[in-house]
Amino acid sequence: MVKLTMIARVTDGLPLAEGLDDQKDADFYKQQAKLLFKNLSKGQNEASRMSIETGPNFFHYIIEGRVCYLTMCDRSYPKKLAFQYLEDLKNEFERVNGDQIETAARPYAFIKFDTFIQKTKKLYLDTRTQRNLAKLNDELYEVHQIMTRNVQEVLGVGQKLDQVSEMSSRLTSESRIYADKAKDLNRQALIRKWAPVAIVLGVVLILFWLKTKIW
């Protein structure tokens, strides 16, 4: 199945759009993808189509019009369907956003494209549908010539992979810090909201107690 989809500008590696399901190690693979985009922006791995083995998954990407369309699928997902999925994304992305790609200045400028990504991903979910079986049997679309490499070959052994782990760990740590801060803010808001009420009730109870003592 398709697990991760990212679209980036090749000239500088800027992420343009993304489709991501909640899954284990999502941040780790997302950072790997960003490092791949960075390498491509430096003119490395210039193949316009490639499959990259990473753990139990494969990255597949195509480059056209200085844009890289990348997806990550599990090992058993047909390579032919993965690349046809990317072709569908490429055709729609160029049609809708083609004249704005070069001028995009911020990451994920086309985040709304996620709607099309999710819709298209559903079409490729079941490999046994008549539609997908027809695509698998399409002899005009061949993927045998597409190079397959290991992620360590592409990113480099050691330092680059350590960088991915560090970035992933930092993202996890920052998420925890954010959650803790959110809890503190909620606690402070509750205190500010109910503290005056508690003070008034306390004063009333004290006055009532004093009144009973006096009388």
Image (spheres, helix red, strand yellow):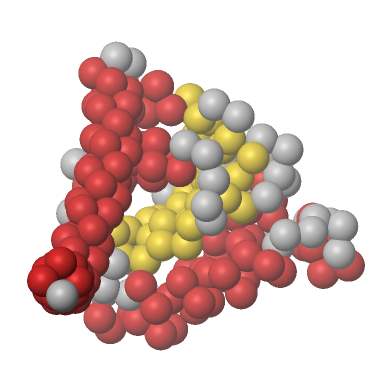
**Outermost residue toward the front in this view:** 215
Tell me which residue sits at (19%, 71%) in the image. 212
Position in image of residue 147 (x %, y %): 53, 35
**Outermost residue toward the top in this view:** 158
Q: Does 96 appear above or below 47?
A: below
Q: Does 84 appear above or below 181?
A: below
Position in image of residue 58 (x %, y %): 56, 37
Residue 201 visible in image:
yes
Q: In which quadrant will I find the C terminus?
A: bottom left
Tell me which residue sits at (43%, 28%) in the image. 151
Tell me which residue sits at (54%, 26%) in the image. 55
Q: Nearer the viewer, residue 200 or 18?
A: 200
Quadrant of the image occupied by residue 76: top right
Q: Does 168 appear above or below 128?
A: above
Residue 69 visible in image:
no
Position in image of residue 54 (x %, y %): 51, 30
- Count of numbered circles on the image: 0
Q: Nearer the viewer, residue 41 or 116?
A: 116
Quadrant of the image occupied by residue 161: top left
Q: Is residue 97 left or right of residue 55?
A: left
Position in image of residue 189 (x %, y %): 19, 67
Q: Nearer the viewer, residue 52 or 76?
A: 76
Tell me which residue sits at (29%, 42%) in the image. 176
